[in-house]
Image (spheres, helix red, strand yellow):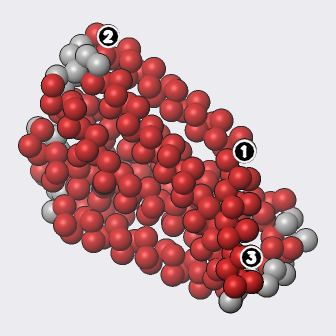
Amino acid sequence: MTEQLRAWTFLVTYSLRRQLFSTKVIVAAGLLGISCLLVLLASMRRTISPQWFGEVVTLALYSPFVFPMLLLGFGTGALGDDRDEGTLGYLLTRPLPRSSIYLGKLVATLPIALTLAIGGLWLLCSIASRTGTPEMADVFGVLAWPHVLAAIAYLSFFHFLAVAFRHSTIIAIVYVLFIEVFLGTVPGVIKRVSIRFYSSSMTFDSGSRLGIAPPEDLVFQPISGAAATATLMLITAGFLAAGTWVFARREFRDVT
């Protein structure tokens, strides 16, 4: 048991260092830099209110595209990088259960991915607060928890794609562009297939005191914050269970 724990800890720390010193971090930093620049330019032209920041910057720009794209590379790359580089076969020969390898790879991505995604949101809030109304000081506290849950749900979903499909990154990009960006603007309940719907519902629920609200209930039709929280947790648990099951039973014939 001690040997397995030591091996698992080494796997997590090695994978974390590998993800940290990868081009994904540079790409994510560039994407965040562009987002911060846009908010900085906006703050020079107007006084930013919590309502405008929440509805325009966060829910119309950051949440549907920037946020999932920050997480996409880490979620699909946790195991996908090993698969593409031909080192997955070596990894599977280690004296660890496949379920431990699968979960360990996901755990290794969490510190970096959450730092970039939630830290990026904090940077945007900080920039907007410099010329914003006094209520802007409360915005990050309202937005943080929904995005933390959404980030973990995204990572579990993208990590599942990496073991279920050979070209998981392409599938994940299509999901973000079509489901999160396009269907997220379609009226009706079809947008409930997106993870963003539930984090947005949580944001509208907790941000109502700051004036953050959907444009029209007939267009968005949010659910309660408690229901959205429970759904995001179920999504995370479901994809973790599904990914662990697939990884434990699948023969990866395309690895060397």
Q: Quadrant of residue 48?
A: top left
Q: Amino acid at mark 1?
A: Ser
Depicted 239 relative to depicted 207: above or below = below
Question: x%, y% of residue 126?
Answer: 34, 28
Q: Secondary structure at mark 1?
A: loop
Quadrant (top left, top right, bottom left, bottom right) of the C terminus? bottom right
> Along the line of sight, which residue is nearer the eye, 128 or 171?
128
Q: CA distance from mark 1 to mark 3?
A: 23 Å
Depicted 182 relative to depicted 168: above or below = above
Q: Amino acid at mark 2?
A: Met
Q: Name which residue lies at 40% across and 71% down.
A: 235
> Along the line of sight, which residue is nearer the eye, 29 or 175?
29
Question: x%, y% of residue 113?
Answer: 54, 51
Q: Name which residue lies at 35% across and 23% down.
A: 127
Q: Name which residue lies at 85% across and 74% down.
A: 89
Q: CA distance from mark 3 to mark 2?
A: 52 Å
Is 108 left or right of 146, judged from the image as shown? right
Q: Secondary structure at mark 2?
A: helix
Check whether the beta carbons of the residues at disc 3 and disc 2 lie within 8 A of each other. Answer: no
Q: Quadrant of residue 135?
A: top left
Q: Tell me which label, 3 or 2, sits earlier in the chain.
A: 3
Which numbered circle lies on residue 44? Answer: 2
Q: Residue furthest front?
A: 2
Which residue in the structure is indicated by mark 1? 22
Question: x%, y% of residue 180?
Answer: 41, 51
Which residue in the structure is indicated by mark 3? 7
Task: Please say whether residue 246 is visible from this viewpoint.
Answer: no
Q: Residue furthest right?
A: 256
